[in-house]
Amino acid sequence: MSAENQGIVNASLAPLPDRVGVDGLEEKWCQDWERSGVYHFRNTRDRRSVYSIDTPPPTVSGHLHVGHVFSYTHTDVIARFKRMQGYDVFYPMGWDDNGLPTERRVQNYYGVRVDTSLKYDPDFKPPFHGTDGKKISAKDQVPVSRQNFIELCEELTAEDEKLFERLWRSLGLSIDWSQTYHTIGDHPRRVAQKAFLRNLARGEAYQQEAPGLWDVTFQTAVAQAELESREYDGFYHRVAFRFQDGTPIYIETTRPELLAACGALIAHPDDERYQKYFGQKVYSPLFKVEVPILAHPAAEMDKGAGIAMCCTFGDVTDVQWWRDLKLPTRSIIQRNGRIIMSVPDWITDQGGREIFEQTEGKTTFSARKIVVDALREAGDLDGEPKPTKRMTNFYEKGDKPLEIVTSRQWYLCNGGTDRKLNQELLERGRELDFHPDFMRVRYKNWVEGLNGDWLISRQRFFGVPFPLWYPVTEEGETDYAHPITPAEDRLPIDPSTDVPEGFEESQRDQPNGFTAEKDIMDTWATSSLTPQIVTHWAEPGEEDQALFKATFPMDLRPQGQDIIRTWLFSSIDRAHLENGCLPWSNTTLSGWILDPDHKKMSKSKGNVVVPDEPIRKYGADAVRYWASSARLGLDATYDEGQMKIGRRLAVKLLNATKFALAIGREDENHHVADSARTTWDPADVTVPLDRAVLAGLARVIDQATQALESYEHSKALETVESFFWDFCDNYIELSKNRAYGTADATGRTPDRGQVLSARTTLGLVLEALDRLLAPFLPFATEEVWQWMHQGEGSVHRASWPLPDAFSQAAQGQDPSLLTWAGTALAALRRIKSEAKVSMKTPILSVSLAVAPEGKEAVRSALDDVAEAGRVTGDLTLVEETPRAEATEEDTGLHVIASQLGEPPAKKPGK
RNA sequence: GGGCGGUUGGCGCAGAGGUAGCGCACUUCCCUGACACGGAAGGGGUCACUGGUUCGAAUCCAGUAUCGCCCACCA
């Protein structure tokens, strides 16, 4: 058994500063930690000894605000705790630079856009440099190859990464900076492509030509997870379709511009109003196209007129009707959101063709106006359009409602169409430990509500390309049914510049040759693989495989609650399909940061706080304290007051420890003359009061450990903190005179054993508290640690305290002794406070009444109480007789009589 | 419309069956040999509301209100 295990602490004491403070600690220790590599993953090859974290990669082109600081601190507290528990913590950092925000930024910054038909140009120089803020118009943008674009992206985001890294370091995140990645880099691209090829080989990825949600601004298909419902102003138009004989039947629509795309009128099969018409034909107004009246249960009787026109495609219900009733496809919206450029052949009526011609190339908005005017003129509009608010699907990054467009897209199975897989993924959700647990239902709701597989292809240019080509037939047609895939060891590839095995570049886009898949993968198709990326999944090297074995499945995924449906779910889907397990065993979900007016902080509201400011103003420990005091999953208010408290705690720790270390050792200037060694042995703690403190400490260690084990960092902090303040306010005050070892007010000098007991207790407890606070206040605790353990390594690699040695040394002493002694001291202080005199004023005599259960406790600490209260004469204890009427606040102890001496004379001057 | 979370002194939060707790702010006092970036003492709440269970309810149950979020609703 080592000395440490027995609770004996051997300290190498460093000289102490005259004055202590928290300013400047960040810089000092950041540099030291970097130099010594405390946070480096030690590459332990044993999975059980490793704690691995799937850190969220922040969007680097995004803006920093205190929300980042908040959730990353929560993770860091856990990382530090696990490290001190002896785990080899694998804590990498990623940067998300894949996707639209970066694409737009690179376009505007350098004046370039991706053209996948171009070849990589190693000598390419962008036309602009550093034009942030100014937008370069599309016609001035120079087309570049995808690889060139990726390089520019890496160049640009390198700056942003530095900014983030500087923030994370100044916040004291214990990230292993040798383990970083960015989502558009070679390695993540290789992982994304490899995983896709394996999905494809197993039949989990497939392509399909189908109607799907489409963003007309970005001109790309959009997945269910990226939808956002927003309120949208619309108008109900009551429009007449007519039977052969001219009898009208009215429908209501908010999208009259789609009239030409109508394929049927649909009512509910039970709707008595329309049952008699089922199977009959009517003619659409203006275009005079014959459409049937059909029944389908998805029609809702109480919505609109109860009968709807089905267009291809106005909304997702239209798609359902079109599919179930086998309606003709009559698309009139182009991918840019405008009406098609030629009159469709199903419109045969001359008047109808002329009206359609007027709408060609128009936006849906302008086309609607033309159609409504024509309807009004034709007498087929009943009344005027009535305004309505409706919820419509938007792409979360877009500002126009989504259209439905038919296109060939790639899908990945996610349980949206397969009941068995759906059940399996729900089971994975039950296996995963959510912190807090109630977040689990969000996952469940999402998986249960899926209505289709995951659409992973995007018609964009910047991103991870599908590693695919297609054969081109003799007739020059692309044969999508037989994609050509590269060997895994060639990855990452770009099909627009790389050539499939067995072909020559000259055969590109030629009959009997090949053609590249033009689409790229959704950014989540890469992000969903961060566990595989950071753990070097499927990399062939021996080192890589060892790393993967030691770190996967990972231990923790920290993330925002808003991306449960995207990041969390898609990661589980990928790991389930690829690895047959959960990607991690725990997930922590942080809440939002609200501004002081309880509004969510967001860039658009302009209420964000840049995190450097509070760090500079209050110190990193203080900001971390604020973040740590919020529970997971609950929103927290941005509260500088809380940071002040954190700062106060850090300063107090410095001062209290300085006192404990200096006492009995300092020269006349309160310096420890030279660095010295000392030993704090729990066996030297003999005084009941001191033992009571150790008993309390053992309990606190136990509680804090349990709280952190269950990811309740705020509870752990609160437990340790309140013990710490109690220790400072009561124990230090009670014991300090004994610890000094000088004569007390009555002229008695404590014996050596009593002095040693106090000093040992001070040392042991503060050393343990330093460890307990280290995950929360890494800077102040490191500073203090170095005073105690000069040259013996960092507190952040020190062992997490165990309760046993302390509870053993307490010898069964009840920790409430400290509470009783503290109460007695408070009573003495109150005498002086009420008399409005200095605490230095001696008490000539005092008599305390104590409840029977506390009398023995107070008696055993009586010397310390008397000394701390400066009682120079008699301190008598009387057992309190239970009183008939209980006082409003009964502490079990009160002053019966007291006599104060003269307050000490004020020092002249100052 | 379905679901989740919150509602506790002026503010920020803890407490989850035994009669309300912490911090900030506030009041008064104190420059005491760790700390004035400090210390001591104190005032302040019918725990959103209404019912119920219980000897006893901030705490459990039912419902209401209110704030926030997630999902659904697109004729």
Image: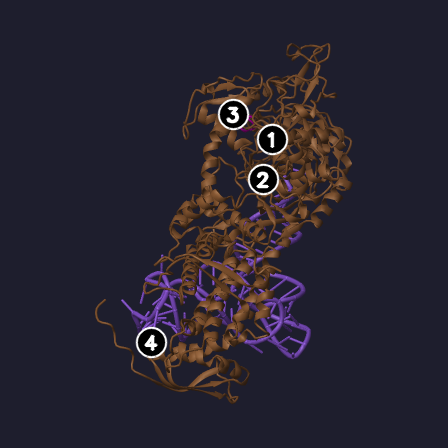
Chain colours: A brown, B purple
Q: Chain of mark 4?
A: A
Position of the N terminus of chain A, as image quadrant, is bottom right
- In the displayed structure, A754 sits above or below A576; it is below
Q: Do the residues at pointers 2 and 3 share their chain?
A: yes
> Badge 3, how many Cα within 10 Å: few under 14, some, many 20+?
some
- The quarter of the displayed image where residue A216 is located: top right
- Return the residue at label 3: A151
Q: Give the residue type at disc 4.
A: Lys
Position of the C terminus of chain A, as image quadrant, is bottom left
Q: Which residues are magenta?
A: A363-368
Alpha-carbon span between mark 2 and mark 3: 32 Å
Q: Chain of mark 1?
A: A
- In the displayed structure, A857 sits above or below A762; it is below
Alpha-carbon span between mark 4 and mark 2: 67 Å
Q: Which mark is residue A228?
A: 2
Whether pointer 3 and pointer 4 mark residues with C-beta atoms closer than 8 Å, the reply is no
Nearest-to-viewer mark from 4 and 1: 4
Q: Secondary structure at mark 4?
A: loop
Alpha-carbon span between mark 4 and mark 1: 69 Å
Q: Which mark is residue A187?
A: 1
> Badge 2, how many Cα within 10 Å: few under 14, some, many 20+?
some
Alpha-carbon span between mark 1 and mark 3: 14 Å
- The quarter of the displayed image where residue A540 is located: top right
Give whichever of discs 2 and 3 has the lower sequence position.
3
